[in-house]
Image: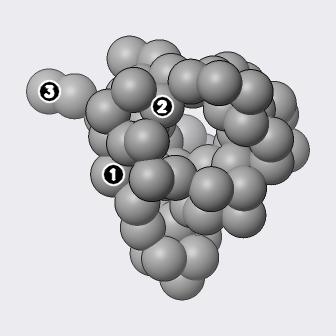
């Protein structure tokens, strides 16, 4: 089973995005989603942004992950 985590792109430098994931900053490769822009919510899997999602869906997914994790 694979798990993609939603986050909001805060900065882009070439093919690397800084992504805010529930308050933590991570880097994600944008080579699979070159159309992504700062402010977009994307699903991150294995270090790559793989899908753009709307903010409501991103927040819903993060809430479910927190619930499963017991936080």
In depth, the one of 5 and 28 nearer the eye is 28
- Estimate the x, y position of residue 51 in percent, counting from the top left: 33, 51
Front position in the image: 7 or 16: 16
Contact check, label 2 and label 1, Cβ < 8 Å: no
In the image, 63 versus 26, the foreground residue is: 26
Q: Is residue 6 left or right of residue 52?
A: right
Label 3 with label 1: CB-CB less than 8 Å: no
- Residue 69 in which image quadrant: top right
- Work out which quarter of the rendered image holds the N terminus and state it: top left
Q: Identify residue for label 3.
A: 1
Name the residue: 39% across, 26% down.
31
Mark seen at residue 51: 1
Residue 40 in the figure: left or right of residue 21:
left
CA–CA distance in space, label 2 to label 3? 22 Å
- CA gap between label 2 and label 1 equals 10 Å
Q: Earlier in the sequence, mark 3 or mark 1?
A: 3
Q: Residue at x 58, y 76 (%)?
A: 55
Q: Earlier in the sequence, mark 2 or mark 1?
A: 2
The residue pinned by badge 2 equals 30
Please identify, in this view, whether the residue under mark 2 or under mark 3 is nearer the observer: 2
From this viewpoint, is residue 6 visible? Answer: yes
Which label belongs to residue 25? none
Horizontal side of residue 43 vs 62, given as left or right: left
**Is 36 situated above or below 31?**
below
Q: In this rendering, is residue 55 above or below 22?
A: below
From the top left corner, tell me how far across and down residue 37 is, in percent: 62, 56
């Amino acid at each position: 089973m694979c798990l993609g985590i939603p986050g909001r792109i805060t900065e882009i430098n070439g093919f690397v995005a800084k992504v805010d994931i529930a308050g933590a900053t991570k880097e994600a490769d944008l080579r699979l989603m070159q159309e992504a822009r700062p402010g977009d919510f994307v699903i991150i899997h294995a270090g790559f942004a793989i899908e753009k999602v709307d903010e409501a869906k991103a927040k819903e997914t993060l809430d479910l992950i927190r619930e499963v994790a017991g936080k």
